[in-house]
Image (cartoon, helix red, strand yellow):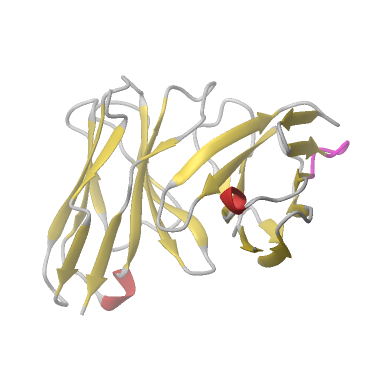
Amino acid sequence: NAGVTQTPKFRVLKTGQSMTLLCAQDMNHEYMYWYRQDPGMGLRLIHYSVGEGTTAKGEVPDGYNVSRLKKQNFLLGLESAAPSQTSVYFCASSYSQWNNEQFFGPGTRLTVL
Amino acid sequence: GQQVMQIPQYQHVQEGEDFTTYCNSSTTLSNIQWYKQRPGGHPVFLIQLVKSGEVKKQKRLTFQFGEAKKNSSLHITATQTTDVGTYFCAESPNFGNEKLTFGTGTRLTIIP
């Protein structure tokens, strides 16, 4: 049981490049989330999903897109990376809205030059 | 939007001293969760509080939910080096909501 996994662990992009971060969970959780973590800012919600085929905006969605084609996977895309998107990205999942303890992946450290 | 204030932002203590972090909300909460993030690691769930005035203990950690359900605290007795990390509170605006709003965290460092 791997829990929540994220790929890649590290990435360096140039401004304007695109990339996709992959999150996978094997706990059959309905809900999945993408957060970014910046120094002194805590965890801020980018997008989330309440089930396969659904997505919703969080607190800081601009510049990101997401897709949840399969229940176990949640993809975060950056179409045109900017230096302001340099951050650590965490994916999380939870069983339901009534049991919403969140399980986090190990994170992806992204640097945009 | 919701404001989740967490204080202090940083705390340095001698090993063996106690530590407390506080979480204050501008609105009445339905429930609050606490997470711990070790340096270089990811947040890990510690506990959830639901009832007004609720107190829960996990070994040296004591979690409390305020009577008015607008604040919460985490107290660690006799800190150890393994307690190093950042402690976050996270709140739901209403029970059954799938989203959490995280506080800014309190970073605890231990002086051996």
Residue ID at (24%, 52%): A65
User: Seen in the image, is B12 located left or right of residue A68?
Assistant: right
Q: Is residue B8 in sight in this rendering? A: no
Question: Which of the 4 image quarters holds residue B33?
Answer: top right
Question: Which of the 4 image quarters holds residue A4?
Answer: top left
* Position of residue B8 measured from the top left corner of the image (x, y, whole percent): 72, 64
Residue sitting nearer the eye, B96 or A110 = A110
Q: Is residue B50 in sight in this rendering? A: yes
* Position of residue A99 measured from the top left corner of the image (x, y, whole percent): 52, 22
* Position of residue B35 measured from the top left corner of the image (x, y, whole percent): 57, 43
Q: Is residue B70 magenta?
A: yes
The image shows residue B54, relative to residue B13, as above or below, that is above
Which residues are drawn in magenta? Answer: B66-71
Residue ID at (14%, 74%): A16
Assign the N terminus of chain B to one quadrant of the image: bottom right
The image shows residue A10, relative to residue A3, as above or below, that is below
Residue sitting nearer the eye, A2 or A87 = A2
Residue ID at (42%, 48%): B42
User: Seen in the image, is B48 located left or right of residue B98?
Assistant: right
User: Seen in the image, is A27 located left or right of residue B20?
Assistant: left
